[in-house]
């Protein structure tokens, strides 16, 4: 059994080790890849203890830097985060429109639409067609009302 926080730390640690030791993102380790073999019972590492120390130190630095940046962002955006928390207590689920209302537009724009934006536009496009179809039906109905005599007798 694990807690959410413990699980998050485990994921961050694993992801950072992969960036440093597997994907070659670290200048200190260089463009080398040391993937862990999960199917193997080997207890030896394909690198020296000195390299292991460099990897461990680099991972700690990266995680600490990310933590510091996260705390800075939370402090900077404290009001918006508090508003989000209050909104979550009311609604339980927030959508992108709710986030935009509270936090404002994102500070950067992508040159391409996100999958969510495409999804949302698909529904808007569908709604536009439904509105057009309803307008046509109403227009056709209005034409029939004008051209056909009324079936109910007029009361004097």
Image: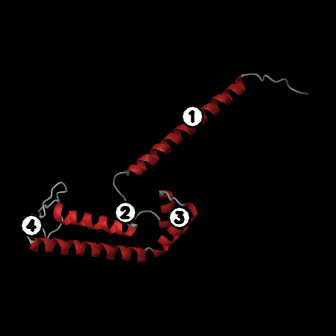
Q: CA distance from mark 2 to mark 4?
A: 41 Å
Q: Are marks 4 and 3 in contact (CB under 8 Å)?
A: no
Q: Of all residues shown, which one is farthest toward the right?
A: 156
| Image point (22%, 71%), residue name | 59
Q: Can you identify the residue that label 1 sits on?
A: 133
| Residue in the foreground of this view, choosing between 11 and 23 | 11
Q: Can you identify the residue that label 4 sits on?
A: 47
Q: Earlier in the sequence, mark 2 or mark 1?
A: 2
Q: Can you identify the residue that label 2 sits on?
A: 108
Q: Find residue 25 and report its horizontal and vertical position in percent.
A: 18, 64
- Estimate how packed mark 4 is, as few (under 14), some (14 to 19) or many (20 or more) residues with alpha carbons within 10 Å: few
Checking the image for residue 88, the label placed there is 3
Q: Are marks 3 and 1 in contact (CB under 8 Å)?
A: no
Q: Secondary structure at mark 1?
A: helix
| Residue in the foreground of this view, choosing between 56 and 30 | 56
In the shown orientation, is residue 135 left or right of residue 43? right
Q: Secondary structure at mark 4?
A: loop
In the shown orientation, is residue 99 left or right of residue 134? left
Query: What quarter of the picture does the N terminus occupy?
Result: bottom left
| Image point (44%, 73%), residue name | 77
Q: Earlier in the sequence, mark 3 or mark 1?
A: 3
Which of discs 2 and 4 lies nearer the camera? The answer is 4
| Residue in the foreground of this view, choosing between 138 and 89 | 89
């Amino acid at each position: 059994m694990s807690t959410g926080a413990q699980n998050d730390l485990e994921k961050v640690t694993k992801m950072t080790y992969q960036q440093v030791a597997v994907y070659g993102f670290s200048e200190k380790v260089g463009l080398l890849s040391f993937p862990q073999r999960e199917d193997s019972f080997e207890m030896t590492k394909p690198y020296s203890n000195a390299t292991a120390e460099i990897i461990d130190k680099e991972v700690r630095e990266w995680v600490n830097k990310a933590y510091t940046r996260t705390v800075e962002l939370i402090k900077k955006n404290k009001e918006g985060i508090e508003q989000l928390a209050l909104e979550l207590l009311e609604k339980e689920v927030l959508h992108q429109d709710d986030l935009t209302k509270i936090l404002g537009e994102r500070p950067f724009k992508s040159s391409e639409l996100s999958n969510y934006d495409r999804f949302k536009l698909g529904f808007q496009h569908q709604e536009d067609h439904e509105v057009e179809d309803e307008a046509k039906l109403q227009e056709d109905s209005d034409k029939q009302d004008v051209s056909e005599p009324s079936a109910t007798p007029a009361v004097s």
